Image: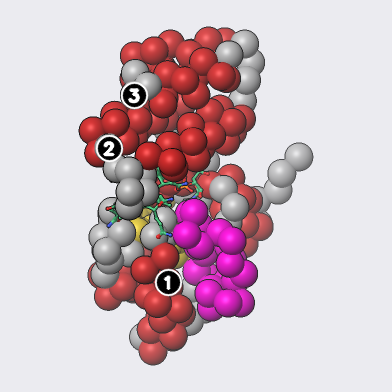
Amino acid sequence: MMDLLVKALLDGDQAQAIIEVRKLREAGVQRRQIITGGVEAAMTQLDAKCTVEQFNLLEIMLCGRAATGVMKVLYPLGALPPQTKAAVVIGTLEGDVHDLGKNIFKMVLTAKGYRVVDCGKDCSLERLIDAVEQEAPVAAGISGLITTIIPQVLQMKDKMAERGLGHIKVIAGGAALKQATAESLKVDFIAQSAFDGLHYLDQIVGVRHE
Ligand code: B12
């Protein structure tokens, strides 16, 4: 069944992808498995079509739209819990327009009761840090899919410290950042997935997992 979901996503067939995800949920498959084994797996396969030599924008956008549709089925807006946990500021840095992963992280956090302040994509460091200053979050989350944003990531903590925000954790995720170590990127934590990020935040705010 997961294979059918991956195929529907790769075909950019949102309606079919939604049918497959409903079947998976009815069969008792967890959201987490659907995201990692379905959505992420499909996007990894899409990789081959998103290179400098081969780039079919329409095809990739349709896959992205199908993935977004699947996420809305997994986390319906009407069924959100009250946002009683800490705030988290998230964004994709300047020059990077990839936002599927960031949006998944946002949905996962929102579904767990965090108040997520989303600075969007192609967001300057200044704007992200302004939001951190205003919202007093427990952490700032950076999503990075292209390596050109790494210099901005390296400056994040220092720039926050200059504004007296050095105590706030910075966590990073996304394909361009997750192979690196937290030390080499000068951040507090590197998340391998949205759930990895969630667990790290839960640890900071002291949520227990059974
Ligand atoms: C879809 C896609 C696009 C779409 C994006 C649509 C959208 N709205 O996001 C479009 C078509 C716009 C696009 C454009 C481009 N793309 Co593109 N794209 C991809 C592709 C195929 C999939 C990315 C994706 O969505 N993955 C699925 C998500 C769910 O995974 P994820 O982001 O890793 O997120 C998960 C975790 O990492 C985590 N996570 C993510 N962020 C965060 C943050 C925090 C804080 C936490 C805790 C967790 C977390 O949560 C998610 C769920 O677990 C990748 C290939 C790849 N393997 O990544 C290339 C890729 C990222 N693109 C690439 C390139 C080069 C481009 C272009 C420059 C293309 C070009 N040749 O002109 C342009 C423009 C980019 C720009 N300026 O930003 C390269 C980057 C290479 C590099 N090393 O820098 C890649 C790697 C393809 C390749 N192999 O060449 N792309």
In the depicted structure, whether residue 38 falls above or below residue 189: above
The extreme right residue here reads 210
Q: Residue at x 63, y 15 (%)?
A: 28
Amino acid marked by disc 1: Ile
Nearer to the camera, 185 or 105: 185
Q: Secondary structure at mark 1?
A: helix
Determine whether, in the image, residue 188 is placed left or right of residue 137. Answer: right
Q: Which residue is mark 2?
A: 56
> Residue 117: x percent and y percent?
34, 55
Q: Earlier in the sequence, mark 2 or mark 1?
A: 2
Q: Which residue is mark 3?
A: 12
Disc 1 under 8 Å from ligand 1? The reply is no
For label 1, the residue is 150
Q: Which residues are magenta?
A: 169-190
Looking at the rendered structure, the kind of residue marked 2 is Asn
Which numbered disc flags the more N-terminal residue, 3 or 2? Answer: 3
Q: Can you say whether 57 is above or below 140 in the image?
A: above
